[in-house]
Image (cartoon, rainbow, N blue to C red):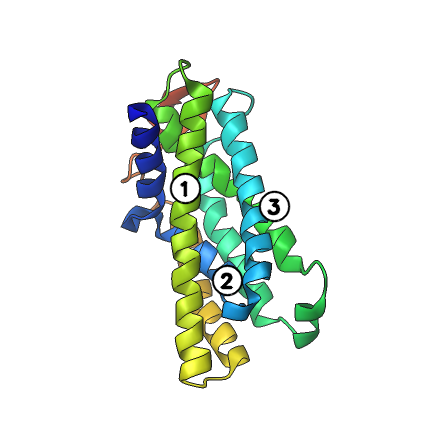
Amino acid sequence: MQDFTFYFQLGLEHILTPDALDHILFVTALCLRYLWHDWRKVVVLVTAFTIGHSLTLALSALDYIHVNAQWIEFFIPLTIAATCINNIFQHHTEQKKRLPLIYFFALFFGLIHGLAFAGQFLSLEGKEGLIAHLLAFNIGIEAAQLLIVLIALLFSFIIVQLLKLSRLVWLRGASAVILIISLFWAYKRFPYHKNYHDDSEKTVLISGTVCCGCYSC
């Protein structure tokens, strides 16, 4: 039980920290188009994202895939940017579709975010109790994501339903702000950019081991 609590808290803290602002903004961008009464659609959306990131997190933990962490950190803001662009150009007719494009965004981009989640998990993990630890870590991530979803829906409720701002204006305005932030991050994180520094000590996964993240590894 002690191990479960430790890895659950690790997953929770992995999302609910300033260092995870990119993941927070991605989940927020996914939820911007929805209001409280759309909760069923939000459940499908979060489930799609969960399936995506759980798959790559598990494959990384089980040593089936190995990815350069610097490229993952670069791709994550691009997933945010793509989601925001989809929000900005969304039409009312898309809301009526059984499977809107945003669901596929959540699933596919979840694969990329799962690789980022794997970095911290693998930096502490051994082989003993791997599956149980992975489950606890993932549940912690899900709990944090649900909190972010609730906050995003609360903001939408206040701005659209209480303050009576146009739903489309809110969606496009908030998405535009997040888009600008994500493009700035993508520019700063490009691995070959001369100003890119590994200040947060990101790891690079190579053949199941964790190295310092330098270009010489």
Q: Which one is closest to the eye, mark 2 or mark 3?
A: 2
Q: Is residue 119 above or below residue 194?
A: above
- Between 201 and 165, the one lying in front of the other is 165
Q: Quadrant of residue 178?
A: bottom left
| Dot 2 alpha-carbon crowd within 10 angstroms: few under 14, some 14 to 19, many 20 or more | many
Residue on which disc 3 sits: 108
* Quadrant location of the N terminus in the rendered image: top left
Residue 186, image x and y in percent?
A: 44, 52
| Dot 3 alpha-carbon crowd within 10 angstroms: few under 14, some 14 to 19, many 20 or more | some
Residue 68, image x and y in percent?
A: 47, 31
Cα–Cα span, label 1 and label 2: 17 Å
| Dot 1 alpha-carbon crowd within 10 angstroms: few under 14, some 14 to 19, many 20 or more | many
Taking the image as drawn, is residue 111 in sight?
Answer: no
Q: Amino acid at mark 1?
A: Ile
Cα–Cα span, label 2 and label 3: 16 Å
Identify the element where label 2 is drawn. Answer: helix
Q: Which one is closest to the eye, mark 1 or mark 3?
A: 1
Q: Is residue 110 above or below residue 149?
A: above
Residue at 52% x, 36% y: name it. Answer: 54
What's the mark number on residue 31?
2
Residue at 65% x, 52% y: name it. Answer: 104
Q: Amino acid at mark 2?
A: Cys
Residue on which disc 1 sits: 141
User: How many numbered discs sit on the rendered protein?
Assistant: 3
Going from N to C along the chain, the mark reached first, 1 or 3, is: 3
Q: Find the residue positioned furthest to the front.
A: 1
Q: Quadrant of residue 120?
A: top left
* Quadrant location of the C terminus in the rendered image: top left
Taking the image as drawn, is residue 6 in sight?
Answer: yes
Residue 199, image x and y in percent?
A: 27, 40
Cα–Cα span, label 1 and label 3: 18 Å
